[in-house]
Image: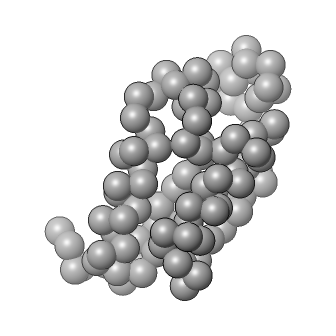
């Protein structure tokens, strides 16, 4: 239901590369996420949470922050989250240990 929220709280974990498919077996993550963020922007203010994954600054966090700045604009509030915790099977992925 559009128009009923003042602020949309959205998340990013991965950037535009292949990390999402390799680590989480999620197809089209970047395309779906960016589409959803743009759609939410059309209907209200945004607060975007960006989870910083270990060893993923250059491939995920940096491109995500650049996309937010360039596409969503400087008025978009961003919460950069450094509280990553390896849960469930994450310990099996060496870069996330």
- The picture places residue 18, in percent across and down from the top left corner, at 57, 29
Relative to 16, residue 40 above or below: below
Q: Is residue 64 left or right of residue 54?
A: left
- The picture places residue 54, in percent across and down from the top left corner, at 80, 38
Q: Which residue lies furthest to the left in this view?
A: 1
Front one among 75 and 52: 75
Q: Is residue 72 left or right of residue 5?
A: right
Relative to 68, residue 77 above or below: below
The reply to whether residue 35 is in sight is yes
Determine which quarter of the picture holds residue 14. Answer: top right
- The picture places residue 46, in percent across and down from the top left corner, at 46, 75
Relative to 50, residue 28 above or below: above
The reply to whether residue 49 is in sight is no
Determine which quarter of the picture holds residue 40. Answer: bottom left
Which colour style is shown? one colour
Q: In what quadrant of the picture does the N terminus appear?
A: bottom left
* Image label count: 0
Front one among 3 and 17: 17
Front one among 51 and 83: 51
Residue shown at 41%/71% (left/top)? 8
Determine which quarter of the picture holds residue 97. Answer: top right
Residue shown at 41%/28% (left/top)? 27
Residue shown at 61%/30% (left/top)? 19
Front one among 55 and 81: 55
Q: Which residue lies furthest to the top in this view?
A: 92
Residue shown at 61%/55% (left/top)? 64
């Amino acid at each position: 239901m559009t128009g009923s929220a003042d602020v949309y709280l959205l998340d990013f974990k991965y950037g535009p590369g292949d990390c999402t498919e390799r680590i989480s077996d999620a197809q089209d993550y970047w395309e779906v996420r960016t589409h959803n963020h743009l759609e939410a922007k059309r209907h209200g203010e945004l607060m975007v949470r960006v989870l910083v994954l270990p060893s993923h600054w250059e491939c995920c966090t940096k491109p995500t922050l650049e996309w937010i700045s360039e596409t969503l604009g400087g008025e978009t509030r961003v919460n950069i989250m450094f509280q990553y915790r390896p849960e469930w099977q994450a310990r099996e992925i060496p870069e996330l240990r």
